[in-house]
Amino acid sequence: MDLRLLSAVRALKGGGIIAYPTEAVYGLGCDPLDRRAVNRLRRVKGRAQGKGLILLAGCIDTVLPYLAASPAQLDRALATWPGPITWVLPCRADVPVWLTGGRRTLAVRVTAHALAARLSQAFGDALVSTSANRRGAPPARTASQARWRLGGSIDLVVPGSTGGQERPTEIRDGASGGILRP
């Protein structure tokens, strides 16, 4: 495992917040089951408690324990994964409210971004994934932008290239297949 991943996993397991490259922008991430880390990430970003968060994973097996999706919903998502599509799917009743924003659904993505996928796999779980920016500001697209904009508020910036997409990932409704965010 390379030093970037070792440092990131150490930060995540210690309750830290990291910035890491994804398909289009740098993401802010933390351990999704660490309430204090998630609340800290929300404060850094300026994100309301009632808004759900996205979980990013390197493989489907990592997000399945969070989900209560039907086989048809999973098939629809799997047809686009790994890839740059986030799906809002029914989740298990025990998924923490700090991830769902009080809904019975959870936004999840199995990424094709090699570094982000390896990071999730090295961590052994999905990561919270929200754009690396403060509310209302443009998201960071490089490690130096993430460091400059958020450096004092986060624990680590994982260097690497984004996947080159122009726009943040599309979000689709798992029930209808409709596009929630183009």
Image (spheres, helix red, strand yellow):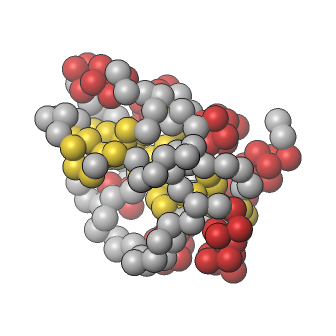
52 above or below 169?
Answer: below
Q: Is residue 177 visible?
A: yes
Q: Residue at x 67, y 49 (%)?
A: 161
**Left or right, 71 with reference to 129:** left
Q: Residue at x 21, y 43 (%)?
A: 179
Residue 139: image x %, image y %? 50, 67
Residue 26: image x %, image y %? 57, 58
Mark count: 0
Quarter that holds the N terminus:
top right
**Image-quadrant location for residue 68:** top left
Q: Nearer the viewer, residue 28 or 26?
A: 26
Residue 94: image x %, image y %? 35, 45
Question: Given the current orientation, which residue lies at the most extreme left position?
Answer: 176
Residue 124: image x %, image y %? 63, 37
21 above or below 123?
Answer: below
**Left or right, 47 with reference to 26:** left
Q: Residue at x 39, y 56 (%)?
A: 53
Question: Given the current orientation, which residue lies at the most extreme right position?
Answer: 3
**Image-quadrant location for residue 172:** top left
**Left or right, 13 with reference to 77:** right
182 above or below 148?
Answer: above
**Left or right, 161 with reference to 88:** right
